[in-house]
Amino acid sequence: MATVNVAKNMLEPVKSLPKYFDKFKKNVFYYISDKHGDRWANRNMAWFIIATWTTVYFVVSTKMEKSALRLKMAKNTQKFISSQ
């Protein structure tokens, strides 16, 4: 499981990206706020942005965890073959 933890630790900076990008936060809150004309179009756009980035994050993290597990299994298989 250590390799899976390594993959999760590698994703830690990705989780904190919005904290570093004030412009990203300002844009999201701009779309969510009611001050700018058609509020439902703005909110729908904000949810589209949020859903898109959530999907990207989920796909990348899942792929990294699966590849880490695959590497771990390959390593264990190699150890098993070499010990025989």
Image (cartoon, rainbow, N blue to C red):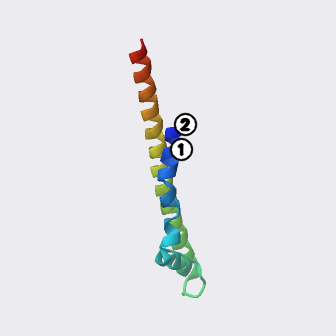
Query: How many labels sit on residues?
Result: 2
Give above or below for 16 relative to 60: below
Task: Please tell me in which quadrant of the rendered image residue 68 appears.
Answer: top left
Residue in front for this viewpoint, 8 or 30: 8
Q: Position of residue 21 (x, y in %)?
A: 47, 73
Q: Is residue 68 above or below residue 22?
A: above
x and y percentages locating residue 50 in the rendered image: 53, 66
For the C terminus, the image quarter is top left
Q: Residues within 10 Å of mark 2 (few under 14, many from 20)?
A: few
Residue at the image point whose x is 54% and y is 87% from the top: 37
Q: CA distance from mark 1 to mark 2?
A: 6 Å
Q: Residue at x 42, y 28 (%)?
A: 75
* Marks 1 and 2 close (CB-CB < 8 Å): yes
Q: Percent position (x, y) of residue 32?
A: 58, 77
Q: Is residue 49 visible?
A: no
Q: Residue furthest right?
A: 34
Residue at far front of view = 83
Quarter of the image that includes the N terminus: top right
**In the foreground, 68 or 32:** 68
**What residue does disc 1 label?**
5
79 left or right of 26 in image: left
Circle 1: is it few (<14), some (14-19), or many (20+) Cα within 10 Å?
Answer: few
Question: Mark 1 falls on what kind of element?
Answer: helix
Q: Is residue 18 visible?
A: yes
Q: Which mark is residue 1?
A: 2
| Secondary structure of the residue carrying numbered label 2 | loop
For the residue marked with disc 2, what is the amino acid? Answer: Met
Question: Which amino acid lies under the numbered mark 1 shown in the image of this protein?
Answer: Asn
